[in-house]
């Protein structure tokens, strides 16, 4: 099997690249999580807002039903009662587009409904929306049970005139003291959806601003801290290793007589393991150079002695010749 080997510098660069890739993967996961969080937040806002809206419809309708029951309790004639209710509610609208209003029924027959004035007094018991919902029956039954909701499609009056079919949520409550009389109101869901979208958009914008802030912080940390730190670490390691390698090459070139220049001392201004290696190498090189220089001196002296013996010009004397720092050879002549 073929094995691949890389220099230490390339390995450090690979580790550096892997770290950057991992950080980018974490950021991508954070982006995905942020989007999912926004979706869940929007869904929760939609549910909570509709629940709050239903509570508000209930509160307003219950309060108005209670007020009307007190306003008509001493009025004996139904006609007079209906006129009092009409006078109380006439012209009252809510919502920004004025699409909200109250309506009052005598069981299934409306006697106040500003949106369908042409049907006042008619029985709407079997009226259905386009989905087949008998919404008048549902509201009547709910009102007789101390309040109830209904969801249906109903023509929405437009500001410029005309109507448009829109989903609607309505609530109805019984008017006490008047058998089968009930009051109701509702809101069109396009208005509700517009509000929930506005709220969700504000939340989404806030989350996105925070996300982009975090992205900028991470990017600045990468550019100003992580990348320079890795680069300094990379340069320091490779420079120290290069210095050690050069010192070893010079030393072995001197030992193998390829270079007569005495190798320079290896100096690293570092307190890490490479610095310890450099100090140990420096000490051993100095010791080895001393020994080799001593051997070179011995070799020169030995050659002189041999040459003297060969020519016969040396006097009889004794001279110590040092072979090594621990060994002396006495040559007698």
Image: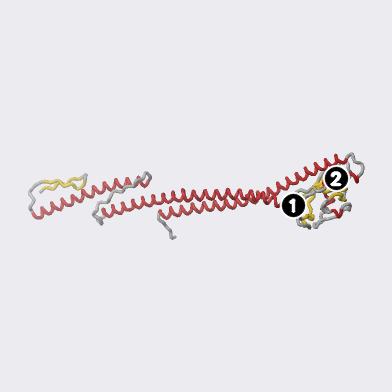
Give the x, y percent position of residue 14.
45, 54
In the rendered structure, the answer to whether residue 188 lies left or right of residue 109 reads: left
Residue 73 point in image, percent of width and height: 88, 40
Front residue of 255/184: it is 184
Is 182 drawn above or below residue 126 in the view shown? above
Using a 10 Å C-alpha cutoff, classify the residue at mark 1 as few (fewer than 14 neighbours), some (14 to 19) or many (20 or more): few
| Left or right: where 272 falls relative to 118 | left
Q: Is residue 324 visible?
A: yes
Mark 1 and mark 2: span between their CA atoms?
24 Å
Viewer-nearest residue: 175 or 251: 175
At x 55% / y 49%, what residue is drawn?
Answer: 213
The quadrant of the picture occupied by the N terminus is bottom left
Residue 85, numbered label: 2
Horizontal relation, residue 97 to residue 296: left or right: right
Does residue 149 appear in the picture of this structure? no
Mark 1 touching mark 2, by CB under 8 A?
no
Residue under the image location 37 percent in, 45 percent down: 273
Q: Earlier in the sequence, mark 1 or mark 2?
A: 2
Percent coordinates x, y for residue 104 in the rendering: 84, 48
Q: Residues within 10 Å of mark 2 (few under 14, many from 20)?
A: many
Counting every numbered tag in the picture gives 2
**Residue at x-position 7% and y-position 49%:** 315
Q: Which mark is residue 268?
A: none
Q: Which residue is mark 1?
A: 97
* Badge 1 element: loop
Residue 58: x and y in percent read 78, 44
Residue situated furthest right in the rendering? 77
Q: Residue furthest bottom?
A: 2
| Colour convention of the picture | secondary structure
At horizontal 83% and vertical 54% (from top left) the residue drawn is 116
- Label 2 sits on a secondary structure element that is helix
């Amino acid at each position: 099997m073929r094995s691949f080997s890389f220099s230490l510098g390339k390995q450090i660069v690979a580790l550096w690249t892997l770290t950057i890739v991992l950080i980018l993967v974490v950021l991508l996961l954070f982006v995905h999580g942020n989007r999912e969080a926004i979706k869940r937040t929007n869904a929760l806002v939609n549910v909570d807002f509709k629940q709050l809206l239903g509570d508000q419809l209930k509160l307003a309708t219950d309060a108005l039903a209670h007020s009307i029951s007190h306003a008509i309790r001493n009025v004996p004639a139904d006609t007079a009662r209906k006129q009092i209710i009409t006078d109380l509610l006439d012209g009252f609208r809510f919502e920004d587009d004025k699409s909200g209003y109250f309506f009052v029924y005598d069981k299934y027959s409306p006697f106040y409904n500003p949106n369908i004035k042409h049907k006042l007094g008619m029985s709407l018991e079997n009226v259905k929306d386009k989905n087949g919902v008998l919404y008048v029956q549902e509201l009547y039954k709910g009102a007789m049970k101390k309040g109830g909701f209904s969801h249906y499609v109903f023509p929405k009056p437009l500001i410029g005139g005309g109507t448009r079919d829109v989903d609607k949520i309505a609530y109805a409550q019984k008017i006490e003291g008047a058998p089968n009389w009930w009051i109701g109101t509702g809101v069109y869901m396009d208005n509700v959806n517009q509000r929930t979208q506005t709220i969700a958009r504000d939340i989404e914008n806030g989350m996105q601003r925070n996300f982009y802030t975090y992205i900028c912080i991470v990017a600045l940390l990468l550019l100003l801290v992580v990348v320079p730190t890795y680069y300094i670490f990379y340069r320091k390691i490779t420079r120290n290793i290069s210095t050690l390698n050069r010192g070893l090459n010079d030393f072995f070139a001197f030992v193998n007589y390829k270079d007569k220049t005495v190798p320079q001392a290896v100096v690293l201004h570092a307190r890490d393991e490479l610095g310890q290696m450099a100090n140990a190498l420096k000490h051993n090189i100095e010791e080895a150079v001393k020994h080799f220089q001593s051997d070179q001196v011995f070799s020169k002296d030995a050659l002189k002695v041999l040459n003297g013996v060969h020519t016969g010009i040396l006097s009889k004397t004794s001279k110590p010749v040092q072979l090594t720092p621990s060994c002396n050879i006495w040559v007698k002549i």
